[in-house]
Amino acid sequence: MRSSFTLIELLVVIAIIGSLATVGFMTFGRTTKKARDTIRKTELAQIGRYLGSAGLDISKYIPPEAPTKGDLFELIVAFESKYGTNMFRQRPFDPLFDKGGSVSGFQYILDGQKNIAIFANMENEEEPATLPAISAPTPRGGSGVFQGVGVWLRGWNGTDRYYQVSN
């Protein structure tokens, strides 16, 4: 008499392997989103330091002809054309955007006094808000994560969480 597995036993093993694979893929997806959010935070913090948004008079660095809001590339181009320099050896990009394109995925907004907020939409919906006093990008609103409302409810990466660096 030969011993072998029954059809039921094989189906149970396949179901267990499928369940484990599903859990693994879900965990990997969350980890990947968190990693891309960490890249966004690091990029924006470095850009913020470079632009002098950590308490410096940003009006000394931002050209007066710069638009008041838009993609960060617009601001970089205005800065470079005014001062005849390259701000970055490599231009910053959101990890989900095409690195050869003309849109960075990072945004900025200026107020009338040339205070600036640079920000990006995050992927991790569970990221806790560290700037609870604001719900939209706000120059002079500080640096950290805020939860958007209204038009900021769903960003280009699909969540209501944004990371902002501001003076």
Image (cartoon, helix red, strand yellow):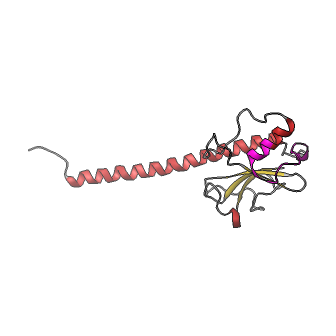
Percent x, y of residue 103: 68, 47
Give the residue furthest to the left.
1
Residue at image position (36%, 51%) is: 18
Q: Is residue 76 magenta?
A: yes
Looking at the image, residue 26 sits to the left or right of residue 165; the answer is left
Q: Quadrant of the N terminus?
A: top left
Looking at the image, the residue that sits furthest to the bottom is 150
Q: Is residue 139 magenta?
A: no
The residue lying at 67 percent from left, 57 percent from top is 161
Q: Which residue range is magenta in the image?
A: 58-77
Would residue 68 be seen by someone viewing this image from the given angle? yes
User: Relative to 143, does residue 147 appear above or below in the rendering?
Assistant: below
Tell me the quarter of the picture where residue 95 sits: top right
Residue 66, how many percent across, how many down?
83, 48
Instruction: Name the foreground residue: 98 vs 154.
Output: 98
- Answer with left or right where residue 103 lies relative to residue 52: left
Q: Quadrant of residue 49?
A: top right
Horizontal and vertical percent for residue 80?
Answer: 81, 38
| Residue 135 vertical placement versus 163 (above, below) | below
Residue 152 higher or lower than 34, as above or below: below
**Residue in front for this viewpoint, 77 or 16:** 77
Residue 149 appears in view: no
The foreground one among 117 and 131 is 117
Residue name at image x 11 percent, y 43 percent:
2
Q: Residue at x 89, y 56 (%)?
A: 112
Q: Could you tell me how many numbered marks the image carries?
A: 0
